[in-house]
Each structure stands twice: as C-alpha cells, then as structure tokens.
Image: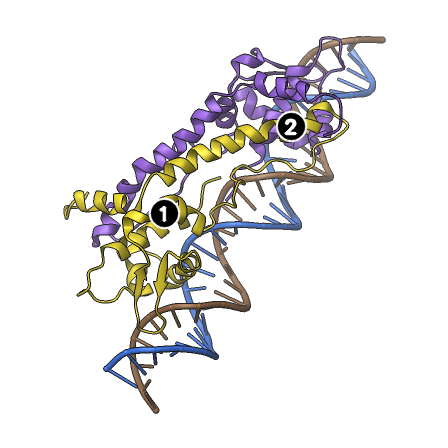
Chain colours: A yellow, B purple, C brown, D blue
Amino acid sequence: MQISSRFSVAVHVLSLLALQQPGDELLTSERMAGSVNTNPVVIRRLLGQLKKAGLVEVRPASGGTFLTRLPQAVSLLEVYRAVEVVEEGQLFSVHDKPNPACLVGRHIQSALDTTLQRAQTALEQVLAGTTLAQVTTDILARGPETS
Amino acid sequence: MQISSRFSVAVHVLSLLALQQPGDELLTSERMAGSVNTNPVVIRRLLGQLKKAGLVEVRPASGGTFLTRLPQAVSLLEVYRAVEVVEEGQLFSVHDKPNPACLVGRHIQSALDTTLQRAQTALEQVLAGTTLAQVTTDILARGPETS
DNA sequence: CCTGCTGTAACCACCATTGTTACAATCAGG
DNA sequence: CCTGATTGTAACAATGGTGGTTACAGCAGG
C-alpha cells in the first residue's frame, strides 16, 4: 500500500509558506487548500500536525501561518515524521503471531527485522538529506511556465 | 500507512519451502497456514502471486509446492515485487490535482518526484541485496531454542 | 462588537487488507 | 477408474486508514 499523500501535501503547504513574501496576502487554510486542491479542513488538520512538530507557527484568527525556521533548516524527514505517515520503525508490517512450534515461525520476525529496518533507514536517509529549500529552489527554477 | 504484511508472509512461506527436505511431508497450504497462523486461502492466494512471478512451482491436488530456484538466487526485492505491495515507482502517493494557476501547485509534483524516487530506490536496493538464503541461514543460526 | 479565521468533532464514502465459507477442478494413489 | 485430499477462485464480511464535508465553538484584530 502507498504512503499517504499527507506527506506530499505537507511539503506543498510548507513550500507555499517558504515562498510567501512579507507584502503578500496572508496564507489562510482556504488559500492553501486552493493551491493543493482540497478542503480547508484537511489543511488545518495538517497544520495542526506541523505545529505540534514545531515546524510552523499558526496565529489564531486572522494572524496567518509562518515557518519557524529557514527552509534550508527543514529536512523532508522531519516533515515525514511530523505527519506520521508511519510510526518510527514501522514502515513494514509483519504478521504478528507466527506459530512458535515451528522453527521458521519462531524466528521469522527477528530474521526479517534487521533487513527491514535497514531498508526503511535507507529510505529515510534520502529524505533526511533533502531540505525544504531544495524543493522551493527547484520549484522556482522550473519557472512561471506551465509544465 | 504500512506496507502490507503480505510481504513478510511471503518471505515466511518461501523460507518454509527453502528449508523443506525431500523426506518431509508435503507442505500444503494448510500446513503453511499453521506456521504463519492464518487461513489456508490466504496462503493459496499468495502462492498464486509467487507462482505468477515464477518463484515457486505449485503442483495441483496433492503434489506439493517447491521453489524454482536456489534460495541464494532469490532476492527479497523479487518477493516484494511479486506480492505487489506497491506498484513500481509508486511507494509514495502524491496529491494528484494541485492548482496549476499557482507556482507551487504547478511544479510540486515534478519537484518532489526525483527525491521520492531516490528514496524508494534506496529502500529497494537494500531488499535487492538480501537473499532468501540469508534469511534461512539466519533462522537456522537462531537455532531450535525459543527466542 | 463583528468579522473572518482557526481548531476540532463528527460523520461519510471509499478502498485495500485480511479472514472466511463455499465449491469446482485437479491429480496421485490405490 | 474412483476416491480423497488439495488447489484455484469467487464471493462476502469485518476492519481500519484516508480524504472530504459540514458544523460550530473559540479567538483576535479592526
């Protein structure tokens, strides 16, 4: 099964925040929802998670939303963790009650664990090595033309 | 969301097949289900996928099931692909209709694509580098004792 | 005080997953 | 050639996460 699009939506939203300029109109959940093409409540739920992770500051009422850090100091791994696409170390699910009376059943979990953990870590290291700034730079580089 | 346990069950089943000896009783779907602790139909469905991928030979009726290759020639990536936990290149799902009228909406997909692809590939390379033989060796090394 | 926004609960439809029953098709061995 | 065990598969249910939607209370700036 696929990893939830919450992650890509989160990066989208954070990119909007990273690119907002002082003079611009405030980025409301409705405006962000318009860019993502979803419902404002979905955005607000997401912002709640990003806020809890300390990545954004949301000022209630008509105060706007802002990054708490420079985009180059935000790794995609932090975003990935913030939106809880998967709990730490649980990307793969392993059948939980193999038969202990069987040699394979007794050890399959521990035999798989190391490899699955390494696979998951490999994925996360790529995310850890990419920053929000790289994403926004890429977006700007692609310019105003429609892709 | 987590990657389906079909994958870990598949490795479990293949380990059973890899460790079966000529003199042993035949490994029926019911016997395998007993070791995995699930329903025989779940095992048969899985064997269907592994068969389609050419990893096992299933002889109908009371014929038994066998690996088509030596365990050291089966990588976990092949198993992962065989059970279709995710379609090729689709581990991450990306929201599909961002607003093209917005700079970020217009380019977020392509800006994310490279990184997500690299992350996914990193995970798959770890699986590609692990063989079924390594898993069974590990199981045997852990010995008859209960973990 | 008003207005517009956020925070959150509640509910929905949808979909993949896993388990289960049922049964036809198949073959090995007697 | 029969029988009995086993596979292949369809059909269905229960579960759980996801994403969308409505509704509304709470908050703050003008």
Question: Which is nearer the eye, C30 or A46?
Answer: A46
Q: Secondary structure under badge 1?
A: helix
Q: State the image quarter where residue A2 is shown.
A: top left
Q: Is there any visible trace of residue B60 in the rendered image?
A: yes
Indicate the position of residue B32 as horizontal and vertical percent values: 70, 25
Q: Residues within 10 Å of mark 2 (few under 14, many from 20)?
A: many
**In this view of the protein, which residue sits in the foreground, C21 or B92?**
B92
In the picture of the structure, the residue carrying the numbered disc 1 is A8
Amino acid at pointer 1 = Ser
Q: Secondary structure at mark 2?
A: helix
Q: Name the disc covering residue A108, or none.
A: 2
Q: Which chain does the numbered disc 2 sit on?
A: A
Q: How much space separates mark 2 and mark 1, taking CA atoms?
A: 34 Å
**Which of the image's four quarters has the C terminus of chain A?**
top left
Q: Residue at x 31, y 48 (%)?
A: A73
Amino acid type at mark 2: Ile
Q: Position of residue A121 (x, y in %)?
A: 46, 35
| Both labels 2 and 1 in a single chain | yes
Q: Are marks 2 and 1 in contact (CB under 8 Å)?
A: no
- Horizontal and vertical percent for residue B92? 40, 40
Picture quadrant of residue A32: bottom left
